[in-house]
Amino acid sequence: MSDSLADQFATTALYGGNADFVEDLYERFLKDPASVEPGWASYFAGLAKGAAPPVLREPTGKSASASRRSCKGPPPLHQRPPAAKPRRRERQASRRVALDPVHANRGHLIANLDPLGLSPRGMPYILDPKYFGLSDADMETEFFTGSRTAALPARSKLKDILATLKFIYCDTIGAEFAHVSDTEERLWLQDNFQAERIQHRFSAEEKKNILWQLTAAEGLERYLHTKYVGQKRFSLEGGDSLIPLLDELVQLGGRAGIEETVIGMAHRGRLNVLVNLLGKSPKDLFIEFEGHYDLQKLRGSGDVKYHKGFSADLKTPAGNVHVALAFNPSHLEVVNPVVEGSVRARQERRGDVKGDKVLAVQIHGDAAFAGQGVVMETMQLSQARGFYTGGSVHIIINNQVGFTTRTRATHARRCTARMSRR
């Protein structure tokens, strides 16, 4: 064997397990070169001169075992005693920690989002505590929750931890964060969602306000259905909560500094939004249903009532917010890029570079969101130069009907999930 190959295959004492020992030898060499063995002295001297040091080989033969003992390195793997198995308590703790991300990522699969019970869902095995080796006997055991917020206590019983996780992620609100690739954004969303779910409670006044708005939304639909039987109106029935949702969105936006909001939506629920959010006179709406039009008010527009737009200044604690509902033709979601363009123009007029003052709100039907390609095409422009608006709020009304021709599987569960499956 050549010298070069012999050097490559030589056994050396320079490995991680001997680092402390070699450093100690080198310190001794720096103080007194004669205090270390000649082989080590020669090696360290080569390092000091900057030359390639000689290969430091471990001795063979009778002195090999003594030399290895002097190096204080770890014994070979086959001679080491087996590592001690972690105690049951430690295994339980490590498995319990895994429950949090699993519920955050998969809890929405069993969230109670179907009030009609049309789509029963089975329990994913990964959400079963038994999958992690936890049993009923562990339910009274306390564990560290590992919470990053003050919303959860530092320690809690397993049964309470599971109940809290199910309330946050598997109740009547579902949330999915796994698709967010930016770790900081994903954890921020998850922590804030978790804290709000645990801490937020509606006051008596807020509950009355929500009830009032739901009653107004349902009352208008019932009246139109009774008074104008058979006329097209694209009812909001099944999605009545859109009205208090939009009102809260405008109020929150006003407090955050939003000065203008542009809403784009198709037909379903438009008449209700016009009256109960923007304040269009019900009298004017009823006149349109009866076929009587004031030519002065039409201003050149003879379009049908569920295509028309409107605008109004709505009061918020921080001042008025101008809210505009864009006119919409029969092409459903084609209004999406129109709204984004309107928002971008308003931002440029205001010098709103970051998109902090003008907000785009896009309202979709559940089946149309998945079936209309213009939705995805518009979303793909979100970060494009010249099209950036600072972000849009997308609201999907899932009344489990799906007006466009789609199979039930398209809209019955999670209408937003279809975006990644097409």
Image: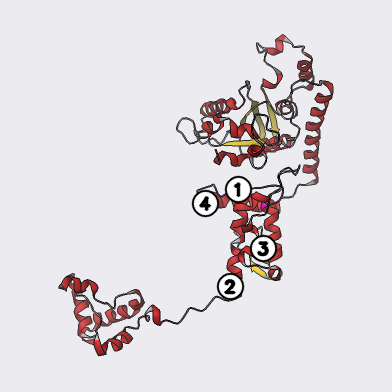
Q: The C terminus appears in which quarter of the rendering?
A: top right
Residue that numbered label 2 is attached to: 90
Q: Which residue is mark 3?
A: 153
Kindly report the secondary structure that dominates the magenta region of the rendered protein. Answer: loop
Q: What x and y, as percent, mark residue 191?
A: 60, 53
Instruction: Give the CA distance from mark 4 to mark 1.
Output: 15 Å
Residue 122 in percent (x, y) is at: 68, 52
**Label annotation for residue 176:** 1
Q: Residues within 10 Å of mark 1 (few under 14, many from 20)?
A: some
Residue 361 in view of the camera: no
The image's mark for residue 146 is none
Q: Give me the C-alpha separation between circle 2 and circle 3.
A: 20 Å
- Could you tell me how far apart the alpha carbons at marks 1 and 3 are, in whole angstroms? 23 Å
Q: Is residue 53 above or below residue 397?
A: below
Callout 3 environment at 10 Å: few (<14), some (14 to 19), or many (20+)?
Answer: few
Per the rendered image, the range of residues in magenta is: 169-178
Q: Which mark is residue 184?
A: 4
Q: Considering the numbered disc 1 on the image, is that residue within a helix, a strand or a loop?
A: loop
**Badge 2 element:** helix
- Left or right: residue 82 compared with residue 145: left
Q: Residue at x 78, y 32 (%)?
A: 217
Say whether disc 2 or disc 3 marks the residue closer to the N-terminus.
2
